[in-house]
Image (spheres, grey):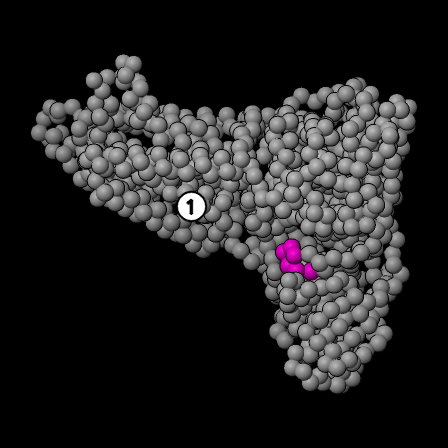
């Protein structure tokens, strides 16, 4: 008969001498307790699981050749990708985009036209749209965007008989940020869609519905082209669903990271038909929480078109995102093939779906819990079923504990004592995390993990594991609880069940992750009982408990390894562009705490049936001490490193700018020229290498300046992430030669009651221009000509930011009015008092006007010195990638 499992003191053999007997009574350990080699087995199991997960995560399908147009071909797609990226950067308004890339895409579309017409089964039509408009956007900061004659290339393919009235929209963008060839963001998406279009064009059977392909040319202008299409293009009325393709890294597996809103059939279609699924409702909830400093055209189609869709993006190697290293050759073979096969399969399924004709409610809440299992298959079920499953698992856990307490296996007091062990361990690990953060800050090791994410494990996870192990080892050495291993294990189940209950109660679909950690471990005793029934085991020993638990937690380790590999790989590169406002150690530290505390929670019961842990703890501490020594005395601790294959560099923006400031009377009171520099990570501009171009002055003094942007030529509204006080204004001797100097004039000033209406005209400037609108003297913004702004929804601000662009052609003159309202009723004489500060900045971010001699010298130094960090002390700080251009800002008071 199989024995009920209890504490290790119930299972140990009788000692052979008095000395050993006394030691056993004190430590509650026995000869059958698990030892060092069992922990080695445990570590090896975790390592094998992690290696397997990483291998599956990196697995790519075989690349198909371009001979057959029945299926997607990466080989064909790369031809256009190489052509587009060979042009270099393609910002909206540049010749590279408006002429060269535009011509390449049009040539391919013309060939597709010929194919469709020759086959004669389907019809095809194309259009070039050049919309103008304005809209308000809440992203990073609330600001307003205006665009003029930007470029959209639109293609519609469908049944020969004519438009079906139900269309699927496929969207990509072929513009880039300045100074990046934009292979993954987002040329690769356009080449994928082009090949999907060619496959559909070669179809010998009639399509059931229409597909609209939008190659948009102004996404990097903060989603302007998508806004122009969904608000103005005549084909927009027939669109019932969309798929948006994006990129925030370079290659890898593309992830479906948000879906909806409503129309759950669309998500279900992806889950059932994508041959290489990679998706998670957890990723959707993280992205939609707003903690990621990024956004996509998904927002525009959802908010302005009220259309449901799928948002899919490449996320691997985020270090390359928006840098000079986003190149075609860095996208590994198979990455394009898998994305293309997924998109084509889902497109075919959507076109055949009856729901495209009669989609469900847009306002319908998410109805699916979904995730993939290391890319092998997807698991999905309804939210309602998920809630039932979660609550049943919680109930089963609570019932199990209740029955054991009722039978006297252990008491409520025993459970309370065990929970105390967990709380003390968590406190110890949290204190350890804070000590490590303080150490990192004190010794200037902030972001030392940036170039090598594995450092997070050694720097944060390892010492917190040691702290948790010390606490539980101490309690195990002084144990007074009967059946202590069972008590500790059941508190693990209770902890997960309670977390699961709360997440389910608050309607978090990502509760599935906790469910997966709970569902099999609940059956640990049932597995042991079953093995006893069939005679596989005769007695429950600590080693039986160990191996059974190891088996039960293998699925947990799989999901944990999958989540950790994705989380660290994604969040570490993001820290390089998160700004100066948040110390990233307070992000990576808690991530390490979650990993360490979860691991300790998974295995803490084993400490109570293990031989004394002192030796293992000393070994781990020695490893940690050796790591710290290496970190502080070698280049391992440098956060940035250049290599041709894997550059891990600091991002900076450097603008060679002229600034002129005029007083209320129109007199010039200040004129200077400088390099406006800000670093995009927390180490900030003050950490830049010592050189007159980068450290030639202190931070700007914004005292007494009403403009939130401190009269600096910000490219866009990012001052909350990158405050002006954390930037540099470095005077340089040479002024910027400006081909189109800004001319700002007030056309009229009109008082209407307590309101003041000011009308302005701007001439000059380039295709990227920004306005800083700062009401003064107790005036508030009431309205303006840009948008029908709702101040309460938009958010009242000290300075309002307007980002103005043009694409195919310039507007010549920009005319607008601003209506101010005096908050105290009695408005002062506007002819005698300052009412408004208006700053106008323009940026030359591409083409022949982008560079100045100063910027060329700075680029040359960065390119040379980042390759030889060993040449001098501190030269690792030259590990920089730069976005630069010439700029002008004019400040006037009215």
Q: Which residue is mark 1?
A: 502
Magenta stretch, main secondary structure, is: strand
Q: Position of residue 262 (x, y in %)?
A: 62, 42
Q: Quadrant of residue 77?
A: top right
Asked if one can make out residue 590 in the rendered structure from this viewpoint, the answer is yes
Specify few, some or many for label 1: CA neighbours under 10 Å numbering under 14, 14-19, or 20 or more.
few
Q: Quadrant of residue 415?
A: top left
Q: Position of residue 806 (x, y in %)?
A: 83, 54
Q: Quadrant of residue 113?
A: top right
State which region is magenta: 138-143
At horizontal 22% and vertical 36% (from top left) the residue drawn is 406
At horizontal 81% and vertical 50% (from top left) the residue drawn is 232
Residue 326 drawn above or below residue 113? below
At horizontal 30% and vertical 34% (from top left) the residue drawn is 400
Helix, strand, or loop for circle 1? helix
Residue 141 located within the stretch drawn in magenta:
yes
Residue 838 drawn above or below residue 122? below
Q: Nearer the viewer, residue 422 or 639?
A: 422
Q: Nearer the viewer, residue 170 or 316?
A: 170
As drawn, is 322 to the left or to the right of 872? right
């Amino acid at each position: 008969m199989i024995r009920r499992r209890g504490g290790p003191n119930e299972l140990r053999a009788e000692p052979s001498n008095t000395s050993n007997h006394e030691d056993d009574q004190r430590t509650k350990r026995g000869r059958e307790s698990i030892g060092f080699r069992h922990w080695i087995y445990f570590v090896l199991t975790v390592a094998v699981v992690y290696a397997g997960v990483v291998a599956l995560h990196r697995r790519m399908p075989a690349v198909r050749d371009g001979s057959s147009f029945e299926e997607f071909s990466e080989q064909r797609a790369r031809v256009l990708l190489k052509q587009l990226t060979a042009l270099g950067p393609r910002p909206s308004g540049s010749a590279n985009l408006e002429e060269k890339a535009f011509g390449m895409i049009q040539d391919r579309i013309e060939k597709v036209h010929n194919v469709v017409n020759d086959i004669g089964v389907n019809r095809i039509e194309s259009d070039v749209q050049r919309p103008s408009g304005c809209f308000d956007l809440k992203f990073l900061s609330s600001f307003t965007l205006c665009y003029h004659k930007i470029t959209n290339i639109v293609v519609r393919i469908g049944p020969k008989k004519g438009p079906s009235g139900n269309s699927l929209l496929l969207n990509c963008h072929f513009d880039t940020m300045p100074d990046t060839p934009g292979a993954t963001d987002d040329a690769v998406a356009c080449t994928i869609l082009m090949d999907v279009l060619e496959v559909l064009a070669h179809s010998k059977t009639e399509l059931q519905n229409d597909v609209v392909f939008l190659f948009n040319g102004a996404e990097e202008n903060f989603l302007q082209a998508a806004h122009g299409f969904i608000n103005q293009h005549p084909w927009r009325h027939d669109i019932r669903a969309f798929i948006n393709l994006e990129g925030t890294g370079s290659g890898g597996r593309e992830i479906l990271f948000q879906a909806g809103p409503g129309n759950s059939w669309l998500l279900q279609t992806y889950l059932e038909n994508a041959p290489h699924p990679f998706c998670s409702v957890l990723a959707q909830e993280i992205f939609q929480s707003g903690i990621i400093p990024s956004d996509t055209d998904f927002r525009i189609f959802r908010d302005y078109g009220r259309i449901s869709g799928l948002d899919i993006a490449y996320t691997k190697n985020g270090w390359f995102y928006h840098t000079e290293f986003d190149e075609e050759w860095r996208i590994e073979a198979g990455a394009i093939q898998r994305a293309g096969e997924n998109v084509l399969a889902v497109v075919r399924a959507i076109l055949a779906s009856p729901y495209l004709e009669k989609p469900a409610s847009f306002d319908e809440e998410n109805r699916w819990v979904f995730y993939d299992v290391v890319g092998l298959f997807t698991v999905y079920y309804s939210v309602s079923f998920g809630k039932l499953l979660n609550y049943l698992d919680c109930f089963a856990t609570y019932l199990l504990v209740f029955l054991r307490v009722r039978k006297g296996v252990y008491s409520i007091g025993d459970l309370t004592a065990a929970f105390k062990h967990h709380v003390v361990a968590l406190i110890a690990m949290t204190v350890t995390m804070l000590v490590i953060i303080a150490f990192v800050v004190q010794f200037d090791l902030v972001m030392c993990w940036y170039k090598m994410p594995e450092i997070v494990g050694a720097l944060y996870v390892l010492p917190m594991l040691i702290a948790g192990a010390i606490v539980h080892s101490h309690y195990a050495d002084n144990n007074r609880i009967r059946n202590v291993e069972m008590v500790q294990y059941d508190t693990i189940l209770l902890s997960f069940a309670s977390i699961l209950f709360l997440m389910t109660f608050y309607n978090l679909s990502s509760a599935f992750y906790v469910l997966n950690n709970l569902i099999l471990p609940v059956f640990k005793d049932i597995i042991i009982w079953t093995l006893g029934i069939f005679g596989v085991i005769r007695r429950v020993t600590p080693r039986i408990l160990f191996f059974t638990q190891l088996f039960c937690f293998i699925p947990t380790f799989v999901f944990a390894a999958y989540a950790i590999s994705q989380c660290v790989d994604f969040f570490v590169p993001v820290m390089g562009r998160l700004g100066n406002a948040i110390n990233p150690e307070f992000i990576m530290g808690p991530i390490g705490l979650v990993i360490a505390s979860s691991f300790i929670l998974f295995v803490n019961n084993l400490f109570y049936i293990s031989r004394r842990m002192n030796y293992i703890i000393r070994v781990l501490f020695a490893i940690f001490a050796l790591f710290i020594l290496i970190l502080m005395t070698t280049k391992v601790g440098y956060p940035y490193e250049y290599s041709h294959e894997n550059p891990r560099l600091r991002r900076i923006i450097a603008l060679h700018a002229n600034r002129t400031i005029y007083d209320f009377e129109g007199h010039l009171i200040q004129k200077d020229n400088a390099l406006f520099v800000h670093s995009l990570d927390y180490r900030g501009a003050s950490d830049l290498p010592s050189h007159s171009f980068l450290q030639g002055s202190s931070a700007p003094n914004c005292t007494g300046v009403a403009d939130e942007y401190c009269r600096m030529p910000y490219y866009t509204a990012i001052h909350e992430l990158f405050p002006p006080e954390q930037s540099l204004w470095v005077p340089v001797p040479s002024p910027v030669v400006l081909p189109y100097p800004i001319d700002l004039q007030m056309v009229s000033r009109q008082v209407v009651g307590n309101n003041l209406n000011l009308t302005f005209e701007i001439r000059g400037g380039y295709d990227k221009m920004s306005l800083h609108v700062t009401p003064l003297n107790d005036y508030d913004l009431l309205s303006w000509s840009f948008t029908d702004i709702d101040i309460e929804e938009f958010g009242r601000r000290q300075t309002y930011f307007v980002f103005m662009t043009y694409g195919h052609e310039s507007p010549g003159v920009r005319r607008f009015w601003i209506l101010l309202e005096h908050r105290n009723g009695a408005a002062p004489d506007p002819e005698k008092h300052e009412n408004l500060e208006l700053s106008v900045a323009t940026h030359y971010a591409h083409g022949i006007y982008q560079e100045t001699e100063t910027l060329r010298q700075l680029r040359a130094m960065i390119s040379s010195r980042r390759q030889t960090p060993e040449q001098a002390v501190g030269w690792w700080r030259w590990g920089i990638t730069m976005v630069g251009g010439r700029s002008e800002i004019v400040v006037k008071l009215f």
